[in-house]
């Protein structure tokens, strides 16, 4: 089972994530309302497979939380959400290390597809990083399988 960390102070991202993952047996959703509580969760060592964070939080900007996540869990794929997306903000977020940047409201099916891709990419990256010469070995199964 893949664990999705949702960090959202206002509830709109949490609502979309709940809709996206509620009928999926392969996902467990962990919600936090502040960046500080999300950072504490990562420091506790809970295995998180993908994070979905709002760009505006009560206690910290989403971009700052993204930076903290990059330092604490550099390989954790992060999907950042925003109500006010632009090309400039997209480029800034992606350059800062986000897996994807989506404008809210996002359809649950779209969020789930992005999360599926992020989890699979992360699993493949870990698999091939163990031994970069594994060309003859089978690919790991996708979390969606």
Image (cartoon, rainbow, N blue to C red):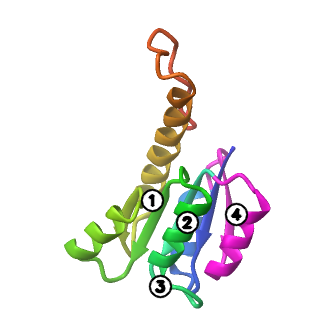
- Label 2 sits on residue: 17
- Label 4 sits on residue: 42
Whether the residues at callouts 4 and 1 have beta carbons within 8 Å, the answer is: no
* Outermost residue toward the left in this view: 87
In the image: residue 48, left or right of residue 64: right
Which residue sits at x=62%, y=61%? Answer: 72
- Label 3 sits on residue: 56
Q: Earlier in the sequence, mark 3 or mark 1?
A: 3
- Cα distance in 3D space between marks 3 and 1: 18 Å
Q: Quadrant of residue 96?
A: bottom left
Label 4 Cα crowd, 10 Å radius (few <14 / some 14-19 / many 20+): some
Which residue sits at x=66%, y=54%? Answer: 48
- Cα distance in 3D space between marks 1 and 2: 7 Å
Label 1 Cα crowd, 10 Å radius (few <14 / some 14-19 / many 20+): many
Q: Earlier in the sequence, mark 3 or mark 2?
A: 2
Q: How many marks?
A: 4
- Cα distance in 3D space between marks 3 and 4: 19 Å
* Quarter of the figure with the C terminus: top right
Which residue sits at x=40%, y=65%? Answer: 107
Camera-near label (3 vs 1) is: 3
Q: Earlier in the sequence, mark 4 or mark 1?
A: 4
Whether the residues at callouts 1 and 2 have beta carbons within 8 Å, the answer is: yes
- Label 1 sits on residue: 111
* Position in image of residue 106 (x %, y %): 39, 69
């Amino acid at each position: 089972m893949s664990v999705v960390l949702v960090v959202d102070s206002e509830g709109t991202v949490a609502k979309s994530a709940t809709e996206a993952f509620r009928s999926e047996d392969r996902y467990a959703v962990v919600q936090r309302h502040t960046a500080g509580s999300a950072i504490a969760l990562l420091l506790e060592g809970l295995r998180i497979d993908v994070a979905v964070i709002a760009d505006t939080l009560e206690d910290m900007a989403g971009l700052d939380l993204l930076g903290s996540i990059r330092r604490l869990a550099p390989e954790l794929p992060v999907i950042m959400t925003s109500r006010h997306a632009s090309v400039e903000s997209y480029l800034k977020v992606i350059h800062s290390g986000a897996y994807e940047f989506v404008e809210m409201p996002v359809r649950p099916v779209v969020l789930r597809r992005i999360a599926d891709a992020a989890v699979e990419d992360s699993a493949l990256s870990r698999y091939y990083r163990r031994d970069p010469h594994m060309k003859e070995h089978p690919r790991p199964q996708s979390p969606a399988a």
